[in-house]
Image (cartoon, rainbow, N blue to C red):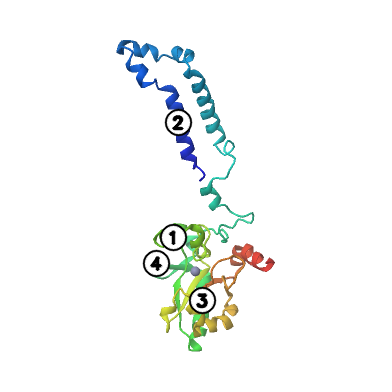
Amino acid sequence: MALRRYDRNNIILIFVARAFSPRGKETNDIPVARRSAQRRWSAYLSSKNSIALFIGFIFLCLTLLLRTDFLFLYPIPLVEELKTTSDGRLLGHFPYGEAMKDDLVMVYADMWIHKDTFAAYKLMRDAALDDGIELVLLSGYRSHKLQKQIFFNIKSTRNQTAIQRAKVSAPPGYSEHSTGYAIDLGDATQRETDFNEGFGETDAFAWLERNAAKYHFILSFPPENSQGVSYEPWHWRFEGTAEALREFEPARRFSQLQ
Ligand SMILES: [Zn+2]
């Protein structure tokens, strides 16, 4: 198994420390008064430890200067796992900034969304109601800080690796929710389908499939999406303004290229 960076540094430090420390047996044979004299620098230079000391010192300097990556010609696993792709994606998700606070409106306690998203959502919700469908707004804006808690807490409680977790939740800094343009929707008559694929079988979802585009909402993660994220029938993003379109341009272009 590959050694981690701090393990390597520990080994190097132990090596250097041994080179510095006098041998126990030899030291104990010397009277206390004479030991300090033997530890002097000049004594070390003339001792057989001097070569090991010199090699250890050079090795430590090189390690610090070159940060070990050059000396150990294999990748470091922790870094490898969270490497972004050339288009900026991390574990399939595109990076997103946080919405400006002034652009957010509070729908109810702890539920904020972008004002443009909310305006379009209200029109869509009312139109659905006219057709006998009651949509429920389950979540909207999430700060990077909140996304960090969600991603890492659930990852650890479910004993999942970052790669497994990223299929169902974006890493912090990579969630569409941080833009304020993404919302999660439920069916008021079938709350047991909240946040699960069962929502895809509800009347509310069928209505959204037929009508959401009129209000500029699109399904971000359909089945077998090119980003490799799990199917999320409840997650819709708003693309009804130039700003919103710009936010999702990389994701849209990527899905069209696949
Ligand atoms: Zn969502």
User: What is the quadrant of the C terminus in the image?
Assistant: bottom right
Task: Categorize mark 4 by other alpha carbons within 10 Å: few (<14), some (14-19), many (20+).
Answer: few
Labelled pair 3, 4 in contact (Cβ < 8 Å): no
Would you say residue 99 is visible in this rendering? no
Residue, disc 3: 121
Mark 1 CB lies closer than 8 A to ligand 1: no
Residue type at mark 3 is Tyr
Please give the name of the residue rendered at 53% of the width and 28% of the height, measured from the top-left corner: 59
In primary-sequence order, the first of circles 1 and 4 is: 4
- How far apart in space, not on screen, are marks 1 and 2 (Cα)? 34 Å
In the rendered image, the residue lying farthest to the right is 257
Between tags 2 and 3, which lies in front?
A: 2
In the picture, the disc for residue 224 is: none
Lower position in the chain sequence, tag 1 or tag 2: 2
Comes first in the chain, label 3 or label 1: 3
Residue 117: x %, y % from top left: 52, 71
Confirm or reject: label 4 Cβ below 8 Å from ligand 1.
Answer: no
Could you tell me the amino acid type at mark 4?
Answer: Asp
Q: Residue 155 carries which label?
A: 1
Q: Is mark 4 on a helix, strand or loop?
A: loop
